[in-house]
Amino acid sequence: MKCPNCGDRTSVEIDIHSSGFSAEQSPVKECGACGLVWRIKMVGDKTEIDIIKPADKK
Ligand SMILES: [Zn+2]
């Protein structure tokens, strides 16, 4: 999974065991390069990037 902000591939998967997460949402990922925290959510038959925390650096 490529970082949607900087394109780096050193993403870290963050395991959040929360009851608020549904099957339509993938695990939260953090970019090891820029610090962006995001997850991919399914909207119909498309995927959408859901930014949780903006990148630390640009
Ligand atoms: Zn990044």
Image (cartoon, helix red, strand yellow):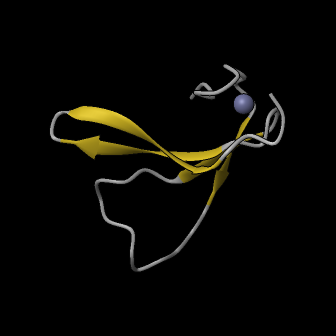
Where residue 41 appears, x then y in whole percent?
36, 46
Taking 39 as reference, is 18 above or below it? below
x, y (%) of residue 36?
69, 42
Nearest the viewer among 9 and 43 is 43
Does residue 30 appear to the left or right of 19 in the view shown? right
Residue at 37% across / 54% down in the picture? Answer: 25
Which quarter of the rendering shows the N terminus? top right
Indicate left or right for 7 with 43 as reference. Answer: right
Q: Residue at x 32, y 34 (%)?
A: 47
Please give left or right for residue 47 compared with residue 18 in the image: left
- Above or below 4: residue 52: below
Residue 32: give x, y in percent of width and height. Answer: 80, 38
Q: Residue 48: where, in percent of width, then height?
A: 36, 37
Q: Is residue 27 left or right of residue 56?
A: left
Instruction: Give the residue at x 67% y 19%.
Output: 7
The residue sitting at 23% across, 42% down in the picture is 43
Whereabouts is ligand 1, in terms of quadrant? top right
